[in-house]
Image (cartoon, helix red, strand yellow):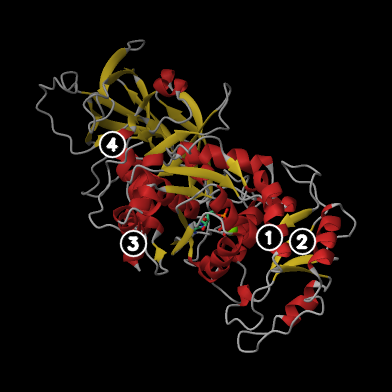
Amino acid sequence: MSDNTTTRERKHFIEEIIEEDIATGKHDGRVLTRFPPEPNGYLHIGHAKSICLNFGVAQTYGGKTNLRFDDTNPTKEKTEYVDSIKRDVQWLGFEWDGEAKYASDYFGQLYEFAKKLIRDGKAYIDDSTAEEIAEMKGTPTRAGTPSPYYSRTVEENLDLFERMKAGEFPDGAKVLRAKIDMASPNMHMRDPVIYRIKHAHHHRTGDAWCIYPMYDFAHGQSDSIEKITHSICTLEFENHRPLYDWCIENLEIFPSKQYEFARLNVNYTITSKRKLLKLVEDGHVTAWDDPRMPTISGMRRRGYSPASIRNFCDKIGVARRENVIDVSLLEFCVREDLNKIASRVMAVLNPVKVVITNYPEGQLEQLEIGNNPEDENAGTRQVPFSREIYIERDDFMENPPKKFFRLGIGRNVRLKGAYILHCEGVKKNAEGEVEEIYCTYYTDSKSGQDTSGVRAKGTLHWVSVPHAVEAEVRLYDRLFLDESPAGHEDKEYTDFINPNSLKVLDTVYCEPHLKDAQVGTYYQFLRKGYFVLDTDSSEEKLVFNRTVTLRDGWAKKGKKK
Ligand code: ATP
Ligand code: MG
């Protein structure tokens, strides 16, 4: 996929590093990056940034990108997550090199690496408990103390490690630690644990292993096994880099290099798999792909296009400084792309019936209406017109103010692609609510061939009553009411959930064209926003999601204050 929509002029620092490496002939100019998710949840907008960065730089410099599952923590990982991650990366428009890879593919190799460290006198088995190890680690200002097991012989360590692998010991009874420096100012270098016992079923290796490498002993080595040239990760791993380098150096393996960038934070949004999982588990949303979720699958279901997410990631750039991006920038990118690609159609969300009294009963006209004024190749479609139509209830006012350019008694309005109407009167029900609106039409005012000379200031969307297709429409608002839901010490992020984040309209009337709507087709419902068919849709019931409104409603709200 080539991204020719890039608007950026300046290179970011990772690109500068890569260019320098290519210029100096490092790795013979080869570029191989990787995207390394842990399959313990669905990917979110933050991961999209990492995906766009890793695959993006490889594309720019003629390189490749691996997809590698960092699956060293068997209790939290699932095949469901693996599948969703693959789907999401592909949907974003990227292709990984060869087969997907797994850290678990390297368990055998990693075990051998660990034995090499032991043989070289650089690792030992520690029987201390997790608490004792934490206590012995000291603090950043106080050096740690050596473990009482520090001086075990190589033979004893090898024997114990093999017996750990053979399943002789219960969870937590022993760990393997690298022998580095208990006085290091970097806590990660104070004899870090590199293997632990965990009698747990792994989603891929089953019960073959009961010892598992720690992140720091799996990640860098996996990079190295795959000969990754640029291992790009978020800033929280900066402190892990010395250990990353130590392992590579002491194992004498391919010298992958780690580079850190600032993670993406978005206001009004949670970007943590653990916190998103809780939203699903506690029923605050229906699933990982609930259209209100900032997950890639949620955004897809909501109707965000892959290009809009890629453009967003491109616009926010890559830097080493932490910042928070305004969620309205993401919505802006969505509108910008959908405006180009969405088919314009008509649907009436809150219908009221209009009877055109001088239009012959039983007459039907097929009107030809353009699909997208922004795209000359989008063509036209036929929309049926008849004596009875639906319009939006709020497009009518009995006694409208002067500036109301929609329908009012005695006023004219144009119907999109059809005729100009003149409103004659209304019928109300016992509650005083308008039940039907009566209009006449100017017979010579047909769109495109209007010779009536009649003026109408506004244009309304409409749907012919006998041809209308009923649908449910789901309107979304932000899931959180607070800009920084996870940023409060005295409150939980779940305290800020917007109780009105979902509004369901159960009787929406759509033009018949939408009967054949497909999941994945982008629509603009004229004047109402961008919509897509939801995956809950069935033969019996059409369900549409509103992706975004046509304009940023929140910006307006902000100004009013
Ligand atoms: P989470 O905090 O949601 O659990 P994680 O970092 O644990 O995320 P991983 O599966 O380990 O999730 O992430 C895979 C890659 O995505 C890592 O390289 C990580 O640095 C990157 N990543 C995760 N969150 C963000 C973010 N908010 N912005 C940019 N990159 C991210
Ligand atoms: Mg992680």
Do the residues under discs 2 and 1 have CB atoms within 8 angstroms? yes
| Quarter residue 264 falls in | bottom left
Q: Which mark is residue 340?
A: 4
Name the one closer to the observer, 472 or 296. 296
Q: Residue furthest top?
A: 362
In the displayed structure, does residue 491 sit left or right of residue 320? right
Examine the rendering and report whether any part of residue 451 can be seen.
yes
99 w.r.t. 38: above or below: above
Q: Cα distance, mark 4 to mark 3?
A: 32 Å
As shown in the figure, which amino acid type bears the numbered disc 2?
Answer: Arg
Q: Residue furthest right?
A: 168
Q: Helix, strand, or loop for circle 3?
A: helix
Q: Which mark is residue 359?
A: none
In the displayed structure, does residue 125 sit left or right of residue 406? right
Q: Residue at left 37%, top 56%?
A: 328
Q: Residues within 10 Å of mark 3 (few under 14, many from 20)?
A: some
Label 2 belongs to which residue? Answer: 196
As shown in the figure, which amino acid type bears the numbered disc 4?
Answer: Lys
Label 1 belongs to which residue? Answer: 214
Q: Helix, strand, or loop for circle 1?
A: loop
Lower sequence index among marks 4 and 3: 3
In the displayed structure, does residue 366 sit left or right of residue 521? left
